[in-house]
Amino acid sequence: MKNDTLEYKGYHARIEYDSVSKSLFGKVEGIKDLVTFESDNLNKVEDEFHAAVDDYLDFCKEVGKTPDKEYLGKFNVRIDPALHRKIAEKAYSEHVSLNAAVEKAIKAYAAS
């Protein structure tokens, strides 16, 4: 993981710098809810991220909401129709689902 990215309890945020306010800030990525944090102290920005995640989880518990999770394992992909047909035909010929074929291709890409 890059050194500008933090991880805590399965949530991730990239740290950015605002030169006007001279502060560091971030937003929890990969969820629909908006969870942000900031700090003017480099040594405290990670603590602020942790506090933001903890506050989010506490809030969800208080209101009876299931917290959003990153990467649920489903997403929409737009590809060229000819490529769609080609992978669908290959999946069919190999007796696997289109989802299984796409997952296999993504695994190969991610491993490279």
Image: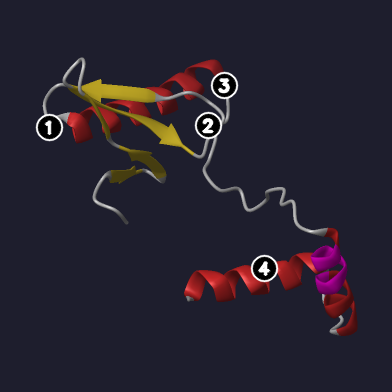
What stretch of residues is rendered in magenta?
A: 82-87
Find disc 4 in the rendering and name its residue: 103
Separation (CA) of disc 4 from disc 3: 34 Å
Q: Counting residues from the N terminus, which is met first, the one under dot 2 or under dot 4?
A: 2
Residue sitting nearer the eye, 11 or 23: 23
Q: Is residue 24 left or right of residue 7?
A: left
Disc 2 residue type (three-letter): Pro
Which comes before the other along the chain, label 1 or label 3? 1
Residue contact at pointers 2 and 4, CB within 8 angstroms: no
**Which quarter of the image is occupied by the N terminus?**
bottom left
Residue type for callout 1? Leu
Q: How far apart in space, not on screen, are marks 3 and 2 (Cα)? A: 9 Å
User: What's the amino acid at mark 3?
Assistant: Gly
From the image, state whether disc 2 or disc 4 is nearer to you. 4
Near mark 4 (Cα within 10 A), the count class, few <14, some 14-19 or many ≥20, is few
| On screen, residue 92 above or below 47 | below
Q: Which residue is mark 1?
A: 42
The image quarter containing residue 49 is top left
Q: Residue 106 versus residue 62: which sits nearer the camera?
A: 106
Residue at x 68%, y 51% (from the top left corner): 74
Q: In the rendering, which numbered label is found on residue 64?
A: 3
Alpha carbons under labels 2 and 4: distance apart: 26 Å
Q: Are marks 4 and 3 in contact (CB under 8 Å)?
A: no
**Front: mark 4 or 3:** 4
